[in-house]
Amino acid sequence: MPALDHTATTTRLASLGAILPGLFLAVLTLLFGFGMGVVFGLNEDAIKSRLSASAETVMASAYNNDPVAAKAVTDKSWSYMQRAHLHAGSLGVVAIALSLVLVHLGTGRRVAAALSVALGAGGLGYSLFWAWAGFRAPGLGSTGVAKESLAWLAIPSSGAVVAATVVTLVLIGRGWLRRGESA
């Protein structure tokens, strides 16, 4: 049985403390997704009615009194809500998993903390983007306009998740190569 490496254990525990803010954001992302699921289950008709009412207020100006066009936007808005729910669940889990991988790799505290926060905040921000775009679109008359108006949120949050995932992949690859050298 190998001897316990107290230095490595202490480093991992310190890194675990460093990723707590990212883990907090990741769990918050999960709770956002769970909350959306509960709200959908309890109030799906009310949400869809609110989306339709929002489109109705701009029927003349945004839809040229075309109820088919308004329905297309409200239907797509509902799919954006569902997309927010699904993104929150998956990105929250990914943020937790990759944050813990970083600790297990023995990544330095600052790097692990930064990557974990990027994963947690990025996942939360991107999930919020889809929900917000879904709520805004019927009143704007377009899902495209709604997404474009929230690009300031979508681009940095999705970019943070992707960049942190790529860096984590590089760190995993580096760890794998180092392991091969020591064998």
Image (tube, grey):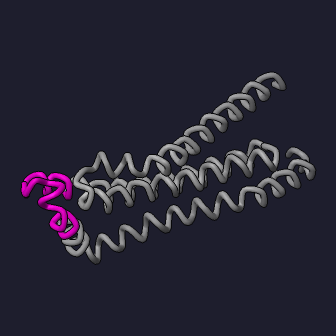
Q: Which residues are magenta?
A: 53-74
Q: Which residue is found at the position 7% from the left and 57% from the top?
A: 65
The reply, left or right, for residue 67 in relation to residue 109 is left
Q: Residue furthest toward the front?
A: 61
Question: Could you tell me what secondary structure mostly forms the magenta stretch?
Answer: helix
Please name whichever residue, 180 or 17, is drawn nearer the observer in this view of the structure.
17
* Residue 38: image location, x then y, percent: 36, 73
Q: Residue furthest toward the top?
A: 181
Image position of 42 with respect to 133: above or below: below
Image position of 9 with respect to 108: above or below: below
The reply, left or right, for residue 154 in relation to residue 60 is right
* Residue 97: image location, x then y, percent: 60, 51
Q: Which residue is found at the position 91% from the left and 47% from the top?
A: 3
Count the marks: 0
Image position of 94 with respect to 42: above or below: above
Q: Which residue is found at the position 31% from the left and 48% from the top?
A: 145
Please name whichever residue, 89 or 120, is drawn nearer the observer in this view of the structure.
120
The reply, left or right, for residue 83 in relation to residue 29 is left
* Residue 71: image location, x then y, percent: 13, 57
Q: Which residue is found at the position 50% from the left and 63% from the top?
A: 30
Q: Quadrant of the C terminus?
A: top right
Per the image, is 75 magenta? no
* Residue 149: image location, x then y, percent: 39, 50
Per the image, is 71 magenta? yes
The reply, left or right, for residue 60 in relation to residue 110 is left
